[in-house]
Image (cartoon, rainbow, N blue to C red):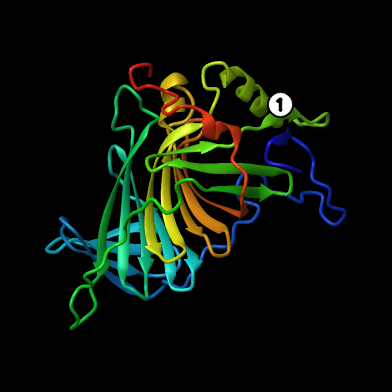
Amino acid sequence: MSYNHRMIGQKIYNPVSPNPSIGGMKQYLEPPTNELAGKTLEVHLDGLPPVMIRFLDGTNLQWAKPGEAFRWEQYEAAKGDENLYLIKFLLAERSPVTHVTLVWDAVTTLVTCVLAVLGADGAHPRLVESTAYYGAQKLPRQPLAAGRHGLTDDLVGKRIIWRYNPNDEIMHVYHGSDHLRLGDSDKVLAPDADEEARKHYQAFLDREGIYPCYEEPTYYIKLREGFYLYSVTERNINRVLPNQGGNQLLILLNALRVRYIGRVFGYRGDGSIENDFIGGIGRFGPQPDKVESLQYPIYEQSEI
């Protein structure tokens, strides 16, 4: 198998299980963690009021700003490394739909919050817009940490081939400090592909002429040595194909082990809200992909 030859819908051989793959980007996803249950996190983000968060158990939390009543939310948490947590939850009864993702380093006490809003752009209702805020955890009787996570160019010019299941690899090309491309690949429909795979394959064909290369706006944040958070928002594909894309992927990359835990937020094809963890294992690609030679930007804003 190679990332530049994708067999869409190929069945996975496994003599032990009749359903060996859960498909998509979740096969290598580790279970959420319950380690935050019973903990309290006081978050101070630069330019915003402090927020107190109580993790009541493995799935429920309360949060409040000073002088306000606590609000209940359901959350999920995953680990990017020891003492490095990715926490996500939707704000209930908030319109437009608003999503909070926190990255908390319990060693350095640094916190990054990505606030994402779905449907704020009336002309592009599928499009997610996000803002990253930087800050730290306030510990009792201790000053707030002076350091911050921050934007970085460390990954620019590099590429990782991600494997999501035994039959599916995709190359992330970190082409510039504000965008990401996917490596070029030939897509072939497997002879025994099911109906869902055939629809997936047809979607590729339908958009090939107007969206020939995946290039989407991205920002990269350094969390600690060898660990990064990057955001990819599928804006360009949504502009040329309004019924597709618009989703935001947030990826917490462990570049030392070359694996990630991430989350997807946006609309699914059926119109329901997608708020899922994803995961992949990978390897750095030493050779440039042919998409790297294409002029930037591929999609001018005046065109979309």
Camera-side residue: 46 or 175?
A: 175
Is 108 rendered above or below residue 226? below
Residue 297: percent from left, percent from top: 41, 27
Q: Residues within 10 Å of mark 1 (few under 14, many from 20)?
A: some
Residue 240: percent from left, percent from top: 45, 19
Figure quadrant of residue 198: top right
29 sits to left or right of 43: right
At label 1, the amino acid type is Arg
- Location of the C terminus by quadrant is top left
For the point 41% across and 71% down, which residue is it? 36
Count of residue discs: 1
22 sits to left or right of 126: right
Is 68 rendered above or below residue 265? below
For the point 18% across and 83% down, which residue is it? 141
Residue 19: percent from left, percent from top: 77, 49
201 sits to left or right of 230: right
- Location of the N terminus by quadrant is top right
Is 139 rendered above or below residue 254? below
Is 264 rendered above or below residue 210? below
Residue 91: percent from left, percent from top: 32, 49
Camera-side residue: 170 or 29?
A: 170
Q: Secondary structure at mark 1?
A: helix
- Judging by the rendered image, the residue that carries numbered circle 1 is 198
Can I make out residue 69 in this image?
A: yes
Camera-side residue: 132 or 4?
A: 4
For the point 62% across and 32% down, which residue is it? 184
Figure quadrant of residue 205: top right
